[in-house]
Image (cartoon, rainbow, N blue to C red):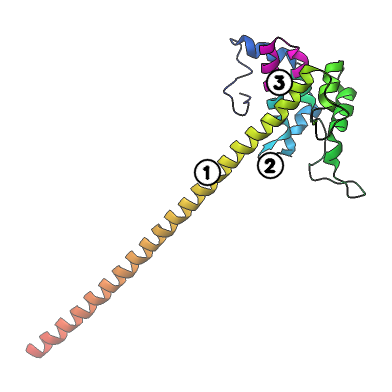
Amino acid sequence: MVKITGSKFDMYDENDTKAVTFRNCVDGILENGEVSSLGGYKHHHFTTRLQHSLNVSYYSYCLCRKLGWDFRSAARAGLMHDLYFFENTSVDENGQKLLKSHPFRALENSERIFELNEIEKDAIVNHMWPCISLSRPRYKESMVVSFSDKFCAVIEATLGASLFAARKSSAAANSIASGISDAYVQTKETSLYMLRSIRGTAANVIRLACSFII
């Protein structure tokens, strides 16, 4: 089952009309090899670029569907909004971060692979507004994709940090428990050694005393 971060939604549930409609919206995109390769890129520290894109696609779809807007274009644009193929820490020959140009790279790649409408183009290239964009988003669906992008980033960072902290705490607890266990074993072995030594010494003393008496 494909999971959406922060949701129990199952996009492959054939009995869920919402799931079937969502799949129809992104049909041909999610299965594309280049889009699938986004799963190999770390994103927002705790997730992958593919997972993030799927999250943005789903939440954009939900909001536009609720409002009666073009949810198909929003879902498709959300899935393509980060369609670039370099690490977020990459720099060019002048030492400039490539991440600054990623909305434009994403639009170039999306247009190369898929046929886009004007809403999808605008939503992709302006999803970083007001930080990095050609202009303010021109369509309400574009604004939804931009909002969903920020919303998902917060969810992913928050849940990711919580899980990371939980794993660290668990590892620390296990380490402490292991240390206590090791100390117990060592103490037990030392105690047994001392008891054996005392018992042996006592036996020798008794034998020595007996030899004098007898």
Q: Residue at x 44, y 59 (%)?
A: 179
Indicate the quadrant where residue 194 lies. bottom left
Label 3 environment density (alpha carbons within 10 Å; few <14, some 14–19, many ≥20) = many
Residue 87 image offset from top left, x and y in percent = 79, 42
Q: Which residue is mark 3?
A: 60
Residue 68 image offset from top left, x and y in percent = 70, 9
Q: Residue furthest left?
A: 214
Which image quadrant: the N terminus? top right
Residue 73 inside the magenta-drawn segment: yes
Q: Which stretch is magenta?
A: 59-74
Residue 126 image offset from top left, x and y in percent = 83, 27
Sequence-wise, which precedes: disc 1 or disc 2? Answer: 2
Mark 3 vs mark 2, CA separation in Å = 22 Å
Q: Which three-letter amino acid code belongs to the residue tagged 2?
A: His
Residue 74 image offset from top left, x and y in percent = 76, 18
Q: Is residue 31 visible?
A: no
Can you tell which mark lies on residue 45?
2
Mark 1 vs mark 2, CA separation in Å = 16 Å
Which image quadrant: the C terminus? bottom left
Nearer to us of marks 3 and 1 is 3
User: With 171 as the anchor, is 136 left or right in this view?
Assistant: right
Indicate the quadrant where residue 90 lies. top right
